[in-house]
Amino acid sequence: MHHFEYRDGVLHVEDVAIPEIAAATGTPFYCYSSATLERHYRVFSEAFRGQPARVCYAVKANSNLAVIATLARLGAGADVVSEGELRRALAAGVPPRKIVFSGVGKTDSEIIFALETGIDQFNVESEPELERLSELATARDMTARIAIRVNPDVDARTHEKISTGKAENKFGISWQRAPAVYARAAELPGIEATGIDVHIGSQLTDLAPFEAAFRRVADMVENLRAQGHDITRIDLGGGLGIPYRGDNDVPPHPDEYAAMVKRCIGHLGCELTFEPGRLIAGNAGILVSRVIYEKTGDDRSFLIIDAAMNDLIRPTLYDAFHEIRPVIEAAGTAEKVTYDVVGPVCETGDFMAKGRRLPRLKAGDLIAIMSAGAYGAVQASEYNTRPLVPEVLVQVDRFAQVRARPSYDAILKQDMIPSWLE
Ligand SMILES: *Cc1c(COP(=O)(O)O)cnc(C)c1O
């Protein structure tokens, strides 16, 4: 459910017509709906009513300060994977006691910053990280509260580039090693190991892999408790999928997910943390682009648009499907064309959609690439020296740029010519 609908034939974001935003900002731009962000956060958190659960939004899905602040106002915590994201969460008003820090490669300076900030929990992903965290905490007379991220070795049955819970993936500590690592953690002075953490992948559209992983986690908690470890917290990560193809693919509802969680681990009486990212931001954002040319090739037609893989890399990187809608709704009788929708970047992999049936479009028309709110702007680059795509947030009938398009001067000023070339 989202708030991007046609009104009188013009695609709107909440109460704002997209052409109005395009006139103010130019194209391409990302556009987010506050009501959709809020709705997704509420649906997810309300699914856990009656369970001791908290939601730490996975900032990496969409880390714009305005997006994080929208969620922070509703009480969301944050799951961060770098010092930069931690600083964003703090700047957007997330209190340190609601922040968890994940990631396989936390550096010393990142750990020190997180310790000094007083975040709630480190999700530890390796034995060397555990040792280092203890040293750095001890040196400051601090104790780091941690959860150990275990790798349950289950197949998330999602795209291989977003699967994280198989033995061959770099994430977490292997199932077999986990008890020894908890034993070691119990000896370390700077560590309080009261939690266990699991995150098996992203865009899961089936509950079965979650259920398999969560049952393993429950068994592990019982084992660890039997060995004298006081495990009181379970972090179940993120990963619940969203519909990318309208009503044709319907992932499990958060209510079903929450009921499954209760079945698997409710009896343990632990405090629960969830780290949804895509579920909250994915369908709350679109990428708006303008057609530059319609080019008719020998065996297909290309729609060349002003957004490209540097703005949204998901089709290229994950073979992702994004629905494409003309901003001005076509009549039901309009001629349809099969297009490859491509950007101007000099890469064969630069496409948004292949073989897509769309009403015939022409230069100057606006299109909306749907479901682009998660893993869109955050993965954008300036490849081909294309200015980083700006972002706009809509709230009911008003909108604001929440990241401006940089000028070419600003882009060129980032480089420096050394003295021997002057
Ligand atoms: C990416 C990630 C998430 C969020 O995943 P979504 O699929 O966006 O919900 C949560 N936790 C960790 C540790 C992650 O790496």
Image (tube, rainbow, N blue to C red):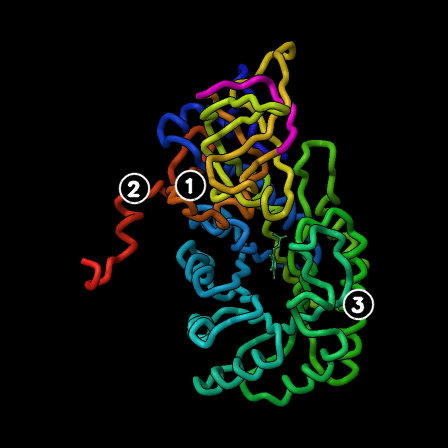
Between the C-alphas of marks 3 and 2, the distance is 52 Å
Q: Mark 3 points at which residue?
A: 216
The nearer-to-camera label among 1 and 3 is: 1
Q: Residue at x 64, y 68 (%)?
A: 170
Q: Does the magenta stretch include residue 362?
A: yes
Q: Which SS type dominates the magenta stretch?
A: strand
Q: Mark 2 points at which residue?
A: 407
In this orientation, which residue lies closer to the viewer: 35 or 276? 276
Circle nearer the N terminus (1, 2): 1
Circle nearer the N terminus (3, 2): 3
Q: In which quarter of the image is ligand 1?
A: bottom right
Q: Quadrant of the C terminus?
A: bottom left
Count of numbered circles on the image? 3
- Could you tell me which secondary element the residue under label 1 belongs to? loop
Image location of residue 409, percent across then percent down = 26, 44
Disc ID at residue 80: none
Identify the magenta region. Answer: 354-363
Contact, CB < 8 Å: mark 3 with mark 2?
Answer: no
Residue 363 horizontal side relative to residue 422, left or right: right
- Tell me if residue 41 can be seen: no
Q: Which residue is drawn at 60% across and 12% down?
A: 331
Between the C-alphas of marks 1 and 3, the distance is 42 Å
Q: Mark 1 points at which residue?
A: 389
Amino acid type shown at disc 1: Val
Amino acid type shown at disc 2: Ser
Circle nearer the N terminus (1, 3): 3
Residue density around tag 3, few if under 14, some if 14–19, many if 20 or more, within 10 Å? some
